Image (cartoon, grey):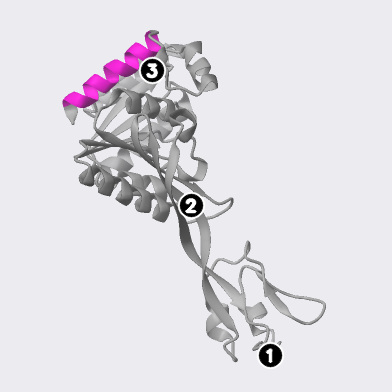
Amino acid sequence: MKQLVIISGKGGTGKTIISACFASLARSKVMVDCDVDAANLYLLLHPEIQESHKFSGGMKARIEQNNCSRCGECVDVCRFSAIHEKKDGEFIVDPISCEGCGICYHVCPVEAIEMEKSISGEWFVSHTKYGPFVHARLGIGEENSGKLVTEIRKKAKEIAEENNLDLVIIDGPPGIGCPVIASLSGADLALVVTEPTLAGIHDMERVVEMAHHFKIETACCINKFDINPANSASIEDWCQEKSIPLLGKIPFDEEVTQSMVKLIPLSEKSNNAASKEIKNIWLNIKKII
């Protein structure tokens, strides 16, 4: 069983569209949407949810009013200004401002503060016509998305092993932060989707450097390569210099947008130039993994 993660360094490069195409092209696989902060792969895969699970990303403080002595020490030590005094003299915790550090819990002289698990989101196991699909929804403003990514990747691997599936396709988050590292961990290949813009080139270099730091094999593809041939040539030269396989160059095509509006993977209904190139990239990936 192999694990393929599609990352981008920055948002908006077409990573999710390519992931959906791979989902329609691959056989014997499970899909995972690890972009839990802004999950949207489900829009193209139309999942039927089979299982739903709550996700706890940390702790929040809660004041037990019957035990509180109204001393105010918790207010003084809270660096996030999460504890407020009401007009009636009660102290309450603002769950949005609370970071769960636990200082108030330790300083409370009457032990009136409890640290409780905070529900940060949900994760799901779903069925699609393309195969099993594991995805998640992180709450607004919630953190610990890396922990949630690890949770759903673990479940996807279990599903692949239980059903003797050959591949886990991971739609990774953008950037180089904690959720990206969690998406890359243990992967057999990272496909970096970039675009011929200065931001695209800069972020591609950063995410490739990070993947190599964790000893993950990388390959690249250029989306909308024909909107700036000079920058595309620069990306090709950089990949050649770093010995990174360039698996394909996808042209700009309005049918890509039309497929998104129709909520279907581009490779399923279209046979245009962009779709053909994505299929070629998939064939090149199969040769590597």
- The N terminus: image quadrant: top left
> Horizontal and vertical percent for residue 65?
68, 83
Kind of residue at badge 2: Glu
- The C terminus: image quadrant: top left
- Disc ID at residue 69: 1
Nearest to the eye among marks 2 and 1: give it.
2
Q: Nearer the viewer, residue 113 or 119?
A: 119
Q: Measured along the vertical axis of the image, is residue 7 above or below residue 159? A: above
**What count of labels does the image hold?**
3
Q: Residue at x 81, y 80 (%)?
A: 88
The magenta region covers 273-287
Residue at numbered disc 2:
122
The quadrant holding residue 195 is top left
The residues tagged by marks 3 and 1 sit, at their Cα atoms, a distance apart of 65 Å
- Mark positioned earlier in the residue sequence (2 or 1): 1
The reply to whether the magenta stretch includes residue 285 is: yes
Q: Are marks 2 and 3 in contact (CB under 8 Å)?
A: no
Kind of residue at badge 3: Glu
Under circle 2, the secondary element is: strand
> Horizontal and vertical percent for residue 50?
41, 45
Residue at numbered disc 3:
268
Q: Nearer the viewer, residue 123 or 19?
A: 123
The secondary structure that most of the magenta stretch takes on is: helix
Q: Is residue 240 visible in this depiction of the protein?
A: no
> Horizontal and vertical percent for residue 216?
24, 41
